[in-house]
Image (cartoon, rainbow, N blue to C red):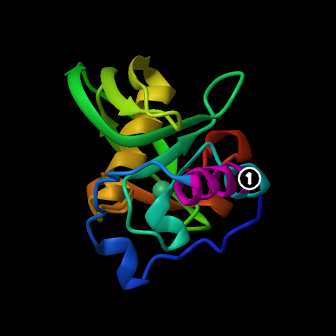
Amino acid sequence: MALREIRLDGDPLLRKKSKDIVEINDRIRTLLDDMVETMIASNGVGLAAPQVGVLRRAIVLDIGDTPIKAINPEIIEEDGKVLDMEGCLSVPGYSGTVERPERIKVKFVDENGDNKFVEATGLSARIFCHEIDHLNGVLYKDKALEVFENKDLEEEEVNEE
Ligand code: ZN
C-alpha cells in the first residue's frame, strides 16, 4: 500500500465526471487500499478516487469497524433532510453547512465483485452523498448554505471527507 497525493480545490480534475469501473482487477484493489491508507493518514472519514487523481467511480468510507470500499456506488433511495457541517480533504481549512438526506439506501459493488446494499443514516449517509458527489465533479462548497474557516470553529465540529 502507498499514500497518494490528495488533489486540492482548483485542480480541474476534481471537476470532471468519473467513469464506471467495468473490471475489478489488482490495479483497482490497490487503488482502494491506497485510498483507505491515505484517508486514515489524513484523519479523513471518506475519500473519492478523483481526489487522488483517478477518474473512476470508487470511494472509501471510515464509518464502522472496518473501512468500506465501494465501487460504482449509487443512491437508490433517500428520505428526509438534515442540515449539518461537513468538510473536505480537498478543501483544507474550511467547513460548511450542507443539506443532505437523513437516510439513504446505497447500492455498490465491493472489491470481490459482489453487489452490496447498505442503509445509512445521519453522518454515514452524509459521507456517502459527499463522496458520490465527488464522482460527479461536485464539491460540498457548491451546495453549502454557508462556508466557515475552521480556525473560527471548535475542533470537534469538523469532519474531513
Ligand atoms: Zn470531499
* Front-lying residue, 104 or 4: 4
Judged by its main secondary structure, the magenta piece is helix
Q: Which residue occupies 41% across, 28% down? A: 125
Whole-percent x, y for residue 69 in the image? 54, 39
> Where is 147 relative to 74, above or below?
below
Q: Residue at x 42, y 18 (%)?
A: 121
Q: Quadrant of residue 27?
A: bottom right
* Magenta extent: 26-37
Q: Three-letter amino acid code at disc 1?
A: Glu
The reply, left or right, for residue 24 in relation to residue 156 is left
Nearest to the observer: residue 109 or residue 78: 109
Please tell me which residue lies in front, 127 or 61. 61
Q: Specify few, some or many for label 1: CA neighbours under 10 Å numbering under 14, 14-19, or 20 or more.
A: some
The number of discs equals 1
Quarter containing the N terminus: bottom right
* Residue identifier under label 1: 37
From the viewer's perspective, tell me whether residue 40 is left or right of residue 133.
right
* 124 in the magenta segment: no
Describe residue 37's horizontal placement relative to residue 135 as left or right: right
- The residue positioned 48% from the left and 42% from the top of the image is 85
- Locate residue 66, reporting x and y percent: 70, 27
Magenta region includes residue 31: yes
Q: Is residue 84 visible?
A: no
| Above or below: residue 96 compared with residue 98 | below
- In the displayed structure, 14 sits above or below 155; it is below
**Residue 70 at x, y = what percent?**
46, 38
